[in-house]
Image (cartoon, rainbow, N blue to C red):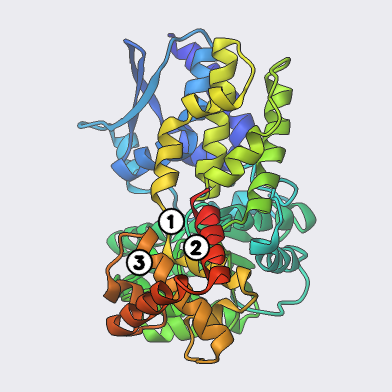
């Protein structure tokens, strides 16, 4: 492949990712070798290469193949002897933007992590587990007066935190393009801070981060234990709040549960609206699959899907949305390649490994949620101190199921039930075992709950 062809591909990538992201992440790439199905690029730093690989690797491979190259894999490696110009890029892959004319767009002034065009409010499927988080994100995206600051979104992997953050940024840039919106990961915040210290540009760093209108930091748990980064994050946070500027934060757990995060930061994060994205329920998973399937039907013309396939997947794959969407992507691709209708048999053959993994992973949290839903009690009461019979019996049932369906030890189960002693768990399990022999309704409930959890 000639440099001229790579130049044409770069122009196509610029249209896809935007001028600012292109300048920061694509332009510094140098195609060094195209051989045996592998395209190798020189990059300024390892961090730079990892970032491009995660966010643009598939795009680059697609455009290379579209241009006639036979590329199966894209690799990024640091040049061991960079030229002076390369060294300058390596030192600052994403530095503070230079002052720009007033007519320049806000997203060009504030270089941050690239936004995924797929992650909009229109493509976000709303259900009971995420409706509060969606409503709160919508309120922030409306761009009105700041009513809660920060908005803190937390939940497990693949539940939609990053999707909502990207959607907020997209909406703000559309509604109010003059706003200075900066979205980045906590890892990027830390990287830029370290770079600023190394290059003695800490005042430029402070000016950049404290001049934004909206600051969005993803996966904030990664700054835990990094003392200097936490210190700067705390002061940045305070400065923006004092200016009534909106802050949106995400993490994999609630602020108070992030280990090694300074207490003053925990306190600050808890002073706004803290919203939990709960694990998906069946209805939400089915809605996500239906939306994704509609898209694939438009891509794979003529490909047929038997009734019941989406319902089967929604029942069986309960881990997270990414696994669910990945399974459907693989299924459509496989059916297209072999030229067959998507049936239940084809689905089970194609996704055997994913289905086996899903079978093994019943969590204590899922058990607690299912039992609480079945007996119509609050999840907080399930793990709380109340001893009323209508709460204590479902709690013991959940303890019994946790012992039966998970590999967790009694002390660990006790910790998940509000820090109870392992002897309390043992008593609850024995109580349910005794009642099963005499209480047919309880036995039926247990069989139903087991089927729901293992479906």
Residue that numbered label 2 is attached to: 366
Q: Marks 3/1: CA distance?
A: 11 Å
Q: Are marks 1 and 2 in contact (CB under 8 Å)?
A: yes
Badges 3 and 1: C-beta atoms under 8 Å apart? no
From the top left corner, tell me how far across and down residue 355 is, in percent. 46, 38
Query: How many angstroms separate mark 3 from mark 2 (CA)?
Result: 13 Å
Question: Dot 3: what SS?
Answer: helix
Asked whether the residues under the numbered discs 3 and 2 touch, taking CB atoms below 8 Å apart as contact, a structural biologist would say no
User: Within 10 angstroms of label 1, few (less than 14), some, or many (20 or more) residues?
Assistant: some
| Image height of 438 relative to 22, above or below | below
Q: Is residue 51 visible?
A: yes
For the point 58% across and 70% down, which residue is it? Answer: 441
Q: Is residue 24 above or below residue 432?
A: above
Q: Secondary structure at mark 1?
A: loop
In the visual, does 280 lie left or right of 228? right
Residue designated by label 1: 362
Q: Residues within 10 Å of mark 3 (few under 14, many from 20)?
A: some
Mark 1 → mark 2, Cα distance in angstroms: 7 Å
Taking the spot 58% from the left edge, 55% from the top edge, the residue there is: 160
Q: Which residue is mark 3?
A: 403
């Amino acid at each position: 492949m000639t440099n001229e062809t790579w130049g044409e591909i770069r122009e196509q990538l610029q249209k896809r990712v935007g001028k600012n992201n292109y300048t920061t992440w694509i332009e510094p790439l140098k195609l060094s070798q195209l051989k045996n199905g592998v395209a190798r690029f020189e990059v300024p730093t390892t961090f730079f290469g990892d970032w491009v690989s995660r966010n643009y690797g598939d795009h680059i491979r697609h455009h290379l193949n579209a241009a006639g190259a036979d590329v199966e894999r894209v690799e990024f490696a640091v040049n061991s002897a960079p030229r002076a110009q390369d060294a300058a890029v390596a030192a600052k892959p994403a530095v503070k933007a230079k002052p720009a004319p007033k007519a320049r767009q806000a997203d060009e002034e504030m270089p941050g992590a690239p936004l995924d065009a797929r992650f909009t409010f229109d493509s976000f499927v709303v259900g009971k587990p995420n409706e509060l988080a969606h409503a709160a994100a919508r309120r922030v995206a409306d761009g009105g007066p700041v009513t809660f600051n920060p908005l803190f979104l937390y939940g497990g992997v693949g539940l939609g935190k990053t999707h909502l953050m990207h959607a907020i940024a997209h909406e703000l840039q559309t509604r109010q393009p003059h706003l200075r919106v900066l979205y980045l990961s906590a890892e990027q915040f830390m990287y830029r801070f370290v770079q600023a210290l190394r290059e003695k540009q800490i005042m430029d760093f402070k000016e950049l981060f404290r001049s934004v209108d909206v600051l969005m930091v993803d996966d904030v748990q990664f700054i835990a234990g990094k003392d200097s980064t936490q210190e700067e994050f705390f002061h940045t946070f305070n400065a923006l709040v004092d200016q009534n500027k909106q802050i949106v934060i995400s993490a994999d757990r609630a602020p108070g549960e992030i280990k090694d995060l300074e207490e003053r930061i925990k306190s600050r994060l808890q002073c706004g609206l803290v919203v939990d994205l709960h694990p998906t329920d069946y209805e939400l998973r089915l809605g996500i699959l239906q939306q994704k399937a509609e898209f694939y039907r438009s891509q794979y013309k003529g490909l047929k899907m038997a009734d019941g396939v989406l319902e089967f997947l929604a029942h069986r794959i309960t881990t997270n949305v990414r696994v669910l969407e990945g399974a459907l992507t693989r299924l459509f691709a496989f059916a297209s390649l072999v030229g067959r209708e998507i049936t239940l048999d084809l689905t089970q053959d194609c996704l055997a490994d994913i289905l086996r993994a899903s079978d093994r992973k019943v969590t204590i949290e899922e058990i607690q949620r299912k039992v609480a839903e079945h007996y119509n009690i609050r999840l907080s009461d399930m793990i709380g101190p109340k001893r009323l019979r209508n709460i204590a019996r479902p709690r013991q049932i959940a303890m019994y199921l946790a012992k039966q369906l998970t590999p967790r030890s009694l002390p660990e189960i006790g910790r998940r039930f509000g820090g109870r002693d392992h002897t309390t768990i043992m008593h609850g399990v024995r109580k349910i075992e005794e009642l099963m022999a005499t209480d047919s309704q309880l036995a039926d409930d247990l069989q139903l709950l087991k089927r729901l959890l293992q479906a």
